[in-house]
Amino acid sequence: MNCIMLLVVLSIIIVSEVLFLSGKKMDAIFIAFWAPTILGFMNYLKYKK
């Protein structure tokens, strides 16, 4: 599951970069905030034991 989530985070970063470079900067910033949120949620679940 961790590998899948990391692939999702990587794809979010790529989509954000594509949007930023195409001129949709506000959309790119909005989507870019998802990556650290997902990583934080993964850490929460990892250390919840």
Image: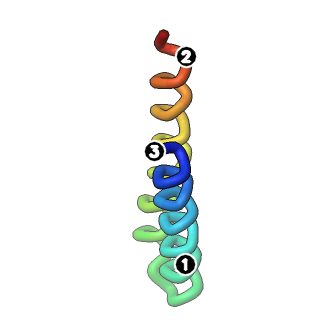
User: What residue did someone put label 2 on?
Assistant: 47
- Given the image, on which type of amino acid does mark 3 rest? Met
Looking at the picture, how far across and down is residue 40, in whole percent?
53, 33
Mark 3 vs 2, N-terminal side: 3
Q: Residue furthest bottom?
A: 22
Disc on res. 1: 3
- Given the image, on which type of amino acid does mark 2 rest? Tyr
Looking at the picture, how far across and down is residue 23, in whole percent?
50, 86
- Picture quadrant of residue 10: bottom right
- Given the image, on which type of amino acid does mark 1 rest? Phe
Reply above or below: 25 against 46: below
User: What residue did someone put label 1 on?
Assistant: 20
Reply above or below: 15 against 10: below
Q: Residue at coordinates 46% horizontally, 32% vertically from top-left?
A: 41
26 or 48, which is in the foreground? 48
49 or 18, which is in the foreground? 49
